[in-house]
Image (cartoon, helix red, strand yellow):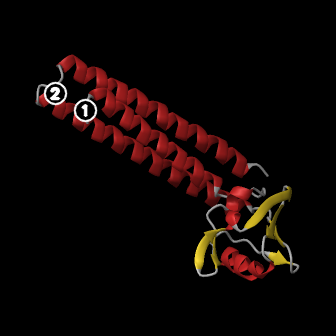
């Protein structure tokens, strides 16, 4: 790191990436409502190459409880169906030879509570990652101070800035968790 400003920018960038990762993890957790994000990570065997589903088919939500997949090539229906069944999403695709429909079942109360636990685990993993970034940043600041590259006042000033950034990013994750938890628990 060239300066404390660079260090702070790097730490904030890593924290932003962590928040975005948590947001993406939350998007893949289904809530009983159809969303194309459910299928974002699914890879299909496309002529021997694992390819993302949205690159070989159009995915849509014609209604809140149904996902529709229109493959660009008819012979991909089988591999797409197989990839969805092998994913851990618990979805049951149905095809009519040209189109795949995936009904999104209603969630039981027990399943909703399990999803909330999963959400909390993802949120805590995100918080831990953010605190690790803070720790690494603080260690760099202390090293700069020890080597007399920065004054004691600057050391405390930048440690406060990293703490404020940490608090802000943890709050973002907490808000994401609260919103997603509310969405999951709403029947």
Q: Is residue 187 visible?
A: yes
**How far is the residue under mark 2 from the one under mark 1?**
13 Å
Locate residue 108 relative to residue 95 in the image: left or right. Answer: left
- Considering depth in this image, is 111 or 19 the residue closer to the camera? 19
Camera-side mark, 2 or 1: 1
- Considering depth in this image, is 11 or 22 the residue closer to the camera? 11
Picture residue at 79% right of the left edge, 52% below the top: 187
Q: Position of residue 27 (x, y in %)?
A: 64, 53
The residue carrying mark 2 is 145
Locate residue 78 relative to residue 123 in the image: left or right. Answer: right
Image quarter of residue 99 = bottom right
Residue 173 badge: none
Image quarter of residue 104 = bottom right
Q: Please, which residue is most extreme toward the left here?
A: 147
Q: Position of residue 126 (x, y in %)?
A: 47, 47
Count of residue discs? 2
Callout 1 secondary element: loop
Image quarter of residue 143 = top left
Note whether 174 is above or below 115 in the view shown.
above
Picture residue at 18% right of the left edge, 31% below the top: 144
- Considering depth in this image, is 105 or 109 the residue closer to the camera? 105
Q: Position of residue 12 (x, y in %)?
A: 41, 35
Note whether 169 is above or below 124 in the view shown.
above
Q: Residues within 10 Å of mark 1 (few under 14, many from 20)?
A: few
Residue 2 badge: 1
Q: Position of residue 11 (x, y in %)?
A: 37, 37
Callout 2 secondary element: helix
Picture residue at 30% right of the left edge, 24% below the top: 158
Picture residue at 78% right of the left edge, 56% below the top: 33
Split into 4 quadrants, where in the image is the N terminus? top left
Q: Residues within 10 Å of mark 2 (few under 14, many from 20)?
A: some
């Amino acid at each position: 790191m060239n300066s404390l400003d660079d260090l702070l920018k790097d730490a904030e960038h890593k924290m932003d990436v962590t928040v975005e990762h948590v947001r993406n993890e939350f998007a893949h957790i289904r809530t009983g409502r159809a969303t194309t994000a459910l299928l974002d990570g699914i890879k299909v065997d496309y002529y021997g190459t694992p390819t993302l589903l949205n690159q070989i088919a159009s995915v849509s939500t014609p209604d809140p409880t149904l996902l529709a997949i229109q493959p660009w090539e008819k012979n991909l229906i089988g591999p797409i169906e197989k990839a969805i069944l092998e994913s851990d999403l618990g979805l049951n695709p149905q095809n009519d030879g040209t189109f795949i429909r995936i009904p999104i079942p209603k969630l039981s109360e027990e399943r909703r509570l399990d999803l909330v636990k999963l959400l909390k685990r993802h949120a805590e993993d995100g918080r831990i990652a953010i605190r690790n970034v803070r720790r690494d940043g603080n260690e760099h600041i202390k090293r700069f101070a020890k080597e007399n590259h920065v004054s004691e006042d600057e050391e405390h000033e930048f440690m406060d800035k990293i703490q404020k950034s940490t608090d802000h990013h943890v709050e973002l994750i907490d808000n994401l968790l609260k919103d997603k938890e509310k969405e999951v628990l709403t029947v």
